[in-house]
Image (tube, rainbow, N blue to C red):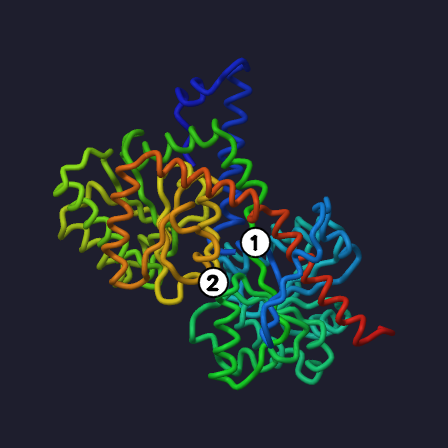
Amino acid sequence: MAKPPPSAAASAAAGRGPAHHRTRLLLLILVAVAASAFTAGYLLRGAPVGPCDTRGDPVDIATARAGGAAARPLGFMKSKLVLLVSHELSLSGGPLLLMELAFLLRHVGCQVVWITNQRLEGTNDVSYSLEHKMLNHGVQVLPARGQEAIETALKADLVILNTAVAGKWLDAVLKDNVPQVLPKILWWIHEMRGHYFKLEYVKHLPLVAGAMIDSHITAEYWKSRTHDRLNIQMPQTYVVHLGNSKELTEVAEDNVARRVLREHIRESLGVRSEDLLFAIINSVSRGKGQDLFLQAFHQSLQLIQNQKLEVPKVHAVVVGSDMNAQTKFETQLREFVAKNGIHDRVHFVNKTLAVAPYLAAIDVLVQNSQARGECFGRITIEAMAFKLPVLGTAAGGTTEIVLDGSTGLLHPAGKEGVTPLARNMVRLASHVEQRVSMGNKGYARVKERFMEHHMAERIATVLKEVLHKQSRQHPHS
């Protein structure tokens, strides 16, 4: 990231030497990038936790176990051996979230072993970098196949499979040892798309110790789809909402860092400090709804013009573009912008995990995922930590995060949602007090439900349940 303008750092100084502030600001910017890399886009939010027994009505144990938050909720995992199996090692949400869990467990003295089931052939700089980071945190990295992987699975106190696709590792590697390992597997599921419901992936799902899913709506979806489509039953299922990392929270709550990041990003985009930025921050694909977002943005410009509204100059920012891929969908997005003559109002930013600088720079986040929506949508709570109102589709995990009319506004998924989204954009462009109020309420909601310690407490509750279930089934092990 480029160095922030000296004037911004100088203006931020208040009673301390400029060298101190310059160093602090640069460090904070680095923290912003690092925090974004490990909280990007995916990866325990919303309602109070609760295992949701998908064989019956949801069972909420959060109330029964309420009390002062322990300083180290995962402390009971000290000296335990945990095997983490990821379907891949990449900068996507699932692997990054599992890495966060690995570091939380290592922090309390847990022995953690990592296996990546599907590795890209040849040298992969991203995989190498992530493996190196895990090794630096004391996480042991093993090949997916081989006797050492089998022995680790058999010895482990807990095995966590990450995503539905990781289920393929069981038969491929463990073979005859699968029945011995199934009772100590916790299956962490993030998928919300129908093509993941394949028997080859999840045939062992009914026999594992439990499933952990990021939202109630996704848990219900898995319950119905596995029953209706695959004729299998979900195991005990725990709904665990995600939380923001301490690093991202520190940046979000530091006014100086936010101001410097805001000035820097806006300067790079060529927009003024008083302009109003609506942004969608997701990988560019039809399922994320960037096309409908741009259609709504174009309609909002027409509404502002037709109604002669006095509002700041508005811009749309699409973060998550891929300049090199030049996919058909991305080409269509750019053609739409050119055809409607709004190229001076729309800004494409290449895909990045450094989302904190953009959250500091924008005014409103648009979460426009289509069909069933996001399983959770972590970027939503990250935006709320920056006191941003959220305009989201009324689908998926977004409905468990955004309080319609309070912390943001919801609109339907699909083409029928374009005009409501456009009107919501005009509404927030016209009423600064609503933007501020929604942003503050969203921030309060994050502080109440979606912090890292909330996530750790929720996961701790699940791990205790799973380990306790094992001790009952195998009292002499």
Q: Residues within 10 Å of mark 1 (few under 14, many from 20)?
A: some
Residue drawn 67% across the image and 61% down it: 61
Q: Nearer the viewer, residue 358 or 454?
A: 454
Q: Name the residue under label 1.
A: 130
Q: Quadrant of the C terminus?
A: bottom right
Residue 149: percent from the left, percent from the top?
69, 71
Q: Which of 53 and 124 is in front in this view?
A: 53
Which sits earlier in the primary sequence, circle 2 or circle 1?
A: 1
Residue drawn 48% across the image and 29% down it: 255
Residue drawn 63% across the image and 62% down it: 60
Q: What residue type is labelled 2?
A: Cys
| Whether residue 105 is visible | yes
| Whether residue 85 is visible | no
Residue 73: percent from the left, percent from the top?
72, 51
Numbered mark located on residue 455 in the image: none
Label 1 element class: helix
